[in-house]
Image (spheres, rainbow, N blue to C red):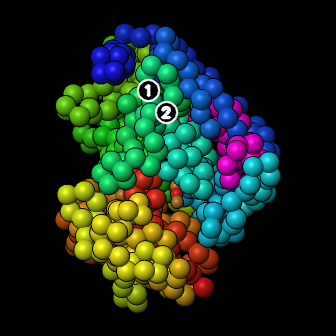
Amino acid sequence: DTLTRRRFCSGLAGLTGLAAGGFSRPAFAAPATLTAQKARVQLAPEGYPATDVWSYDGSLPGPMIRAPQGTRLERRLLNSLDVPTSVHWHGIRIDNAMDGVAGLTQKAVPPGEGFDYAFDLPDAGTYWYHAHTNSMEQVARGLSGPLIVDEAQAPDIDRDEVLMLGDWLLDPDTGRFAEPFDHPMSLSHGGRTGNLVGVNGRFDHGLTARQNDRLRLRLINSATARIFVLRLQGMTGWTVALDGMPLATPEPLGAELILAPAQRIDLIVDITAEEGTPAALAMAMQDDSWRALVEVAVTGRAATTPRPAPPALPPNPAMAPPDLSQARALDMVMEGGAMAGMEGATYQGERLDFRALIERGQFWALSGQAGMPESPFARLSRGEPVRMRLENRTAFAHAMHLHGMHFREVRADGSFGPMRDTILSIPDEPLEIAFTADNPGKWLFHCHMLAHAASGMTTWIEVA
Ligand code: C2O
Ligand code: CU
């Protein structure tokens, strides 16, 4: 009922004052297997029921997978769920056969069976892994975890903290996931947004630090729809990497950070707050107030003076911008959804009007195609530079993600933005991205608001 619901939500707003305990760094050694299995975890505050989730290795988020840059990662997925599944290693410039997309790069792994993932890690940075079979439901149920690739030479920091932001839509009375995962409201509007927000699977994840400590914060948005608007309190700092890829120059933090679904931001921050004064990573609420998402308890002082700005992280290989003079131009029109709709689109080879599409659960289309088309949106030759205009004719923002390769925004003045694998497209704001199609294979391009991906906004390109 609404009263309990209100209490549930406002219980979360009252985080200030909660004792933030010290959390030790998760162990580095991860098992050579990764088991997709059911688990029961306490997502909601104490006093509320626990939640039955789908997890990797029984925890939510899944175990931290961490390896040095340039090494090979091997994990055997064991499927102990009742449904088929597969794992996608988001943001890794990966061998196509290991990309984990059921129906495109592999067969979904049936219950009781396994799949051996093995691939090289060319780039250092903050990545993540998640289910890529019916991901709208499987990721929302908990199938995701952090994947960190370490630079040979770590930056000069006191601590490295992985903060996996997420949200869950729960029934406060039962602790169960509320509402069908394919609710038409989620499909046609902004996706499935949770009523409980948390970090690393906890609604009250906290940190301790001393004044003038320098932390690397690796923010990962694992939510299936929520765009986080974030602000730091009691800290100053720099953005040093986006979607795993280092910025050429660390960028001093502005007023707000925007973290769309699947995006990552690496920050290096200095704690400026004095002992006993508040420091936090805060998120904007719908009413424009701010709520602490991660409280930092400041205990003592590490040094008397802050350090100078950090140098850039070492660049990853293959970060040269694409040659636009030779680039193949592609146009992608995004249509559909509530409040905009569309005339019609092709779905499974058939041209349908909007009403008929909706009956099939398809609310969106990419360039006239709803859902995964038989043939690719574009066939590219290996090494070909590509520029792609994204025209958002919908009434919603979309977090567009390309598998297998990072891209750069081409700004209006022709300059390049930083390398990303997921970019937020805003209605009526023209957006252009460019990349060199240097990774052969079949690569998905889709909205990472996973309800949108499932209801039309998924296509693929082929690099041969
Ligand atoms: Cu992170 Cu196709 O997804
Ligand atoms: Cu979308």
How many residues crowd around disc 1 within 10 Å: few (fewer than 14), some, or many (20 or more)?
many
Q: CA distance from mark 1 to mark 2?
A: 6 Å
For disc 2, the neighbor class at 10 Å (few under 14, some 14 to 19, many from 20) is some
- Is residue 79 visible in this depiction of the protein? yes
Position of 370 relative to 386 (above/below) = above
Residue 346: quadrant of the picture = bottom left
In the image, residue 74 lies in the stretch drawn in magenta = yes
Identify residue type, mark 1: Asp
The residue closer to the viewer here, 310 or 64, is 64
Q: Mark 1 highlights which residue?
A: 171
Residue depicted at 25% across the width and 74% down the height = 343
Label 1: which secondary element:
loop
Q: Determine the residue positioned at 32% across, 37% down.
A: 230
- The image shows residue 463, relative to residue 2, as above or below, that is below
Q: Mark 2 sits on what residue? A: 177
Residue 57 belongs to magenta span: yes
In the rendering, at what x and y percent does residue 452 appear?
Answer: 39, 57
Callout count: 2
Question: Which stretch appears magenta?
Answer: 55-84
